[in-house]
Amino acid sequence: MTGKPVEVEPVHIWNRPGIIVIDKPKGPSSHEVAAWVGKMLGCQVGHAGTLDPQVSGVLLVMLGNAVRLAPLLLQHDKEYICLMRLHGEVDRERILKLAEEFTGRLYQRPPRKSAVKRALRIREIRKLEILDTEGRLVLFRVECDAGTYIRSLCHHMGLAAGAGAHMQELRRTRSGVFGEDGMHSLYDVQDAAVAARAGDSSALHAMILPVDAAVPDLPAVVICDAAIDAVCRGAQLAGVGVVSMKEFGKGDTVAVLSQKNEFVCLGKALVPSASFKPGDTGLVIAPTTVFLQPGIYPRGWIKSDKVFPEKKKQAKKPEKKAGQKPAGRRERGASWKSYGKPAGKPDHQSRKKGYH
């Protein structure tokens, strides 16, 4: 008996927002790695900061509605360890000098194989440290802006050295606040998922980080329990719902937390923190990205039962009878100039000019 194998539906063992730091291996794409994690855990996934198939290292995989953090995570600065191969002999002193020359703001154009438009851009290299050299091989560490192409950096350094160069190997060691010390391999995720299906989810809980771990530098605003459900449904936060806060300015992005340190949402400050105190009236924060599901906290707002009076009905105009002519209107063709003239004869004198 032959036939297609029956596909087993994934077991949904994780249903909350979270972030897991994966040690991406060389070979698969970032999209494939994220899809494998989603299949293991049976949940919606996304990744932040695409790595080329031949690049390894830190890959942030977002679980559940934590995918809404993608625009924020993509802006994180990055750190890489790169092995560059020179196309000619260059002395070490010149290589060290190159590290100084290529530190700072640089013009870059994405490589031909990149997935973005090849438009000229400016990126900042915050630190470029030469770790070791051996023959034509140069090992260096670089801290840079998001969207910096290390392949282009190697090419430009080789041109400046007068010998040419290309990127041999690359590994991402940090993305924002997430580094190699918190990474997990795909094998670790699979083992934790199998243990969770068997009833022990401790390993899985240990490796999945809460969403607020991605925004440690944002000013925090703690709100009362009565205001959480309304905010989760998109309502703007008033000062009466604020328990405590850190300093922020108008238009800043803030992290809204519950009194249990749960990440409720990201919000945009409508007014600066100096203009109000917790408990004051007036709208202060507009939620932009909500992570907590509505209904978890009891509803603190009351639906009004007030019945608003109907608008006064306007007096209806009397219905027009059949054949009745509107009041105040003369017969067609009648005017003061034709007064006393026989009906039916047009008044040619009143028409001085004809319009054709």
Image: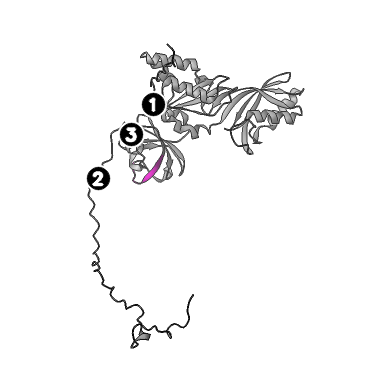
For mark 3, what is the residue?
294
Q: Residue at x 48, y 24 (%)?
A: 35
Task: Reply above or below: 334 against 223.
Answer: below
Q: Residues within 10 Å of mark 2 (few under 14, many from 20)?
A: few
Task: Reply above or below: 4 against 231.
Answer: above
Hey, what amino acid is under mark 3? Pro
- Residue 348 is tagged as none
Q: Is residue 41 left or right of residue 226?
A: right
Q: Which residues are magenta?
A: 279-287
Hey, what amino acid is under mark 1? Arg
Q: Tag 3 or tag 2, which sits nearer the N-term? A: 3
- In the rendering, at what x and y percent does residue 28 appear? 55, 21
Spatial CA span between label 1 and label 3: 13 Å
- In the rendering, at what x and y percent does residue 71 appear? 49, 35
Q: Are marks 2 and 3 in contact (CB under 8 Å)?
A: no
Q: Residues within 10 Å of mark 3 (few under 14, many from 20)?
A: some
Occupied quadrant, residue 279? top left
Q: Residue at x 76, y 29 (%)?
A: 162
Asked if residue 292 shows in the view, the reply is yes
Spatial CA span between label 2 and label 3: 20 Å
- Residue 304 is tagged as 2
